[in-house]
Image: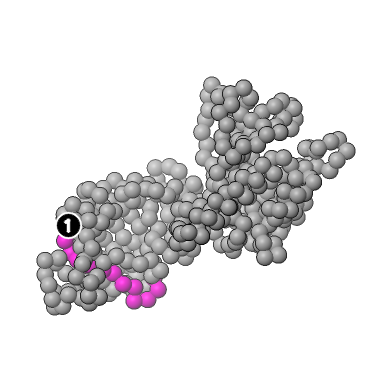
Amino acid sequence: MESSNTMSTTTELPHVHVVQLLIRQELRKRVGFLVFPHETWRPSSAADPYLVLPTKKSVPDPLAASLHGEPLEVFVNTVMEEEFGLKPDDFALEEEAGTTALRMPAIHSGEMKQFIFCPVDVWVNPEAREPLRQRLNGQWLTWGEVIKHPQSAPTVKAVFDHLQLRESDLARRYDKEPQEELKEENPHRLMVLVPDRPSMYALARRWFSRNPGGVRHLPKQVIDAVLDAGDHAFNLRVADPYLRYQLQGQGFTWSFFSHKDRQDIHVHGAPVVEVYGVLEGRLEIWWKPYYNRGTSAWSRQVLGPGDWLEVDALQCHFVHWVTEGKGVVFKAGPGPLAEVGRLGVKGKTLCEQWCRSGKIV
């Protein structure tokens, strides 16, 4: 059997794409991965079955005449809900962990094929982890234990060899740039920590996967859960989408934010307009026309739950939470709304006097 950490271009063998689910648990101050016996796959007729990861074939033949695409969440949901019996809110897809390839005989036919494995990290509610292991008659094994275990399937060893290389690469990267590890969009190390709650990104993407059509319902409990899980805004419509759940703003942006999100101090270029709404707590807003100077030029308003405030173009303003809270903001206008630069050209221009002095001027 041959393995590779890159997707092979070999055409002689049939290719099969397989999603491998990584379900993790704290294990003696280390990270354990759920593996369980595959009753119909054994190294020999008399041997114990191989230990495998939760698996779902996604593309059995990528060169077929007709393919009907399905998102990754469909395969994860099928395994977690239909096969394992978990409730929809007891798991969340966190991130994809790259791909690795392995040439090996197919389990049932014995035909040599090129398997492309796509491991994905799936958060599972801590209360559901051990019952799941028991239902599968599985084990929590660390990376080293998986590699050394005599019953580990060749597919599992290929995936874990890939994960070890990935972990080493990330360790080198984040040791040099520790702040990069904190960014939501960057890959996470999987052998360091198992969180008790899903990330903001996982919750937002789960909501997005359940609202794939042209009309999307955003319940209050989803807003609360996403904002509580993170420390920055929940941006749904943006000028430059870069996260999976974000959509292109059609001349406007739409975001939810809380007291944990740092707000910018800025001047808008014409004709950009912002609308603030308060869902919970009390929000303080200061503003003045950009061309006015002096403390007396500033106005102030405190908003409570249910209050809204519209900020017209060329109004220097900043917001501050007086209490813990949650709010929503819309920004509309032509041009690059999300960029910072020259007044009248970009959507946002820093208020230099405020930034330099730290006082209202």
Along the line of sight, which residue is nearer the eye, 349 or 268?
349
Q: Quadrant of the C terminus?
A: bottom left
Residue drawn at (66%, 59%) of the image: 31
Kindly tell me whether residue 194 is visible in this rendering. Answer: yes
Residue 310 visible in image: no
Question: Horizontal placement of 83 versus 268: left or right?
Answer: right
Q: Residue at x 74, y 53 (%)?
A: 145
Query: Image check: 42 left or right of 101?
Result: right
Magenta span covers which residues? 313-325
Per the image, is 324 magenta? Answer: yes
> Which quadrant of the structure image shows residue 57?
top right
The crowd level at tag 1 (other Cα within 10 Å; few <14, some 14-19, many 20+) is some
Q: Which residue is mark 1?
A: 343
In the image, residue 355 above or below residue 19: below
- Residue 33 picture location, percent across and down: 68, 53
Tell me the residue at 37%/73% (across/down): 281
Q: Quadrant of residue 191?
A: bottom right
- Residue type at mark 1: give it: Leu
Badge 1 marks a residue whose secondary structure is loop
Q: Is residue 221 left or right of residue 59?
A: left
Is residue 152 in the magenta section?
A: no
User: Residue pushed farthest right?
Assistant: 46
